[in-house]
Amino acid sequence: MTYAAALRFLDGLIRADQPRQPYREVKLARMFHLLGLLGDPHRRLKTVLVAGTKGKGSTAVMIAGILRAQGLRVGLTVKPHLTDYRERIQLAGRMIPRAALATLVEQVRPAVEAGRALAWGPPTYVETTVAMAFLYFAQQRVDLAVVEVGIGGRLDATNVLDPLVAVLTPISYDHMEILGGTLTEIATEKAGIIRAGGRVAASPQPDEALRTIARASEAQHARLVLVGRDVEARIEAVSLAGVRATIRGLRGTYPIRLPLLGRHQGVNAATAIAAVELLADRVGPVSAGAVRRGLAAVRWPARVELIETRPYTIVDMGHNPASMAALRETLQELLGGRRLVLVFGMLETKDYRTVTAMIAPLADAVVTTTPDNPHALPAAALAAEVRKYTARVTALPDRRDAVEHGRALAGPEDVLVVTGSVYLVGEAREWLRRRKPAATTRR
């Protein structure tokens, strides 16, 4: 099978034109059946499972980076991907090679096809991807796999694992039509990754979510380590170069430098360190040097990512209120007072009204566009929402036109932000990074 054929097969598993199966009807039986046909690769893995609303990807990448710096062979599976499917399956800090992915699809295809005859139907795109990641990591004999949960936790395809550590990053409102309308309901779903007698590393949480996590941990007799109580993050400097902080952990104190933007990344780093410390008796203690090197080398595209400085150009997946709050705080702290031009696209399935209310009032000019997704909110509809906060808005459905128009509106000292749906931000990031060097002047 060629790489192109492998991608076509995977794309064929996306059923965007069909109604999504109600979350409460989702069972893990289909996932267990698929993995059983593949020889149960997940049972051969040591894992860390990361759930949450905000920062779960960043935290997963940090955990993997620290463990790699310690010399471990680490697998990482994250979602969604920006521009390349292979971002979802990484080994030793690199995406799975194209040939290896094609071979992997060949191996899982018969098991996926066999599911068509079952009452619950064939595995989904996400389930197949997760199974492929587990199979690849087992074949490659990783020392540990860091796995990011997709939606929720309790019924997510990744929750077939028996993780050494369950990580819960900040929980807030997202996927409410699936997970529930209260923080208690949402946190209950996410706390479903906690195992009996297990270990839990949790970021600072709203009171309602924290109470839910604490109850779930107590019910499972799991050890709960909280950032802000057991682990402390002291943020010392936040700049366009990143974050400098000192983390007081369970086993030591770690001065760190992160190349990621935003005060919130210091908290994510503290959560990652807590998780790594909880692993010590299973994978060995991690040195302060490995923590420092691993975090200094972290790269996490499109998370308040600075692309260039004339104008200051930032791309960010601000697709839910929690993510947008982090973006807004970072813009105000690092670039407040500068003229802001916003290129903005959302899916209609997201809480676009709340997200718009958070960012539109900061903008001096807004260009709305239509992401490349069947659930995209049309540019004109998003523009109508933006006009509740500012009249300076232009709707351009074509995404490239929107990005170029945004650039034209931004002067060399201004700030251009492309944000919203991953389906917009991933494309825009590629276009902006491909611009000729002569067009970009860096300070």
Image (cartoon, rainbow, N blue to C red):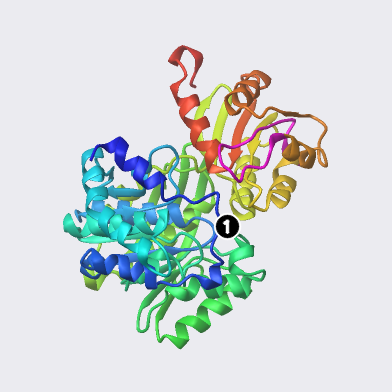
Residue at 61% of width from left, 52% of height from top?
A: 320
From the viewer's perspective, is residue 239 above or below residue 69?
above
Q: Which type of secondary structure does the marked residue at label 1 adopt?
A: loop
From the viewer's perspective, is residue 317 above or below residue 350?
above
As for residue 10 lying within the magenta part, the answer is no
Start and end of the magenta stretch? 361-379
Do we see residue 28 in this rendering? yes
From the viewer's perspective, is residue 365 above or below residue 27?
above
Give the percent coordinates (x, y) of residue 192.
46, 75
From the viewer's perspective, is residue 208 above or below residue 309?
below
Residue at 51% of width from left, 80% of height from top?
A: 214
Give the percent coordinates (x, y) of residue 436.
45, 15
Image quadrant where residue 84 sits:
top left
Chief secondary structure of the magenta portion: loop
Identity of the amino acid at label 1?
Pro
Quadrant of the frame with the N terminus:
top left
Residue on which the image places disc 1:
19
Image quadrant where residue 42 sits:
bottom left
Give the percent coordinates (x, y) of residue 391.
83, 32
Give the percent coordinates (x, y) of residue 392.
79, 29
Q: Is residue 153 left or right of residue 314?
A: left
Residue at 49% of width from left, 40% of height from top?
A: 302
- Along the line of sight, the residue nearer the viewer: 218 or 34: 34
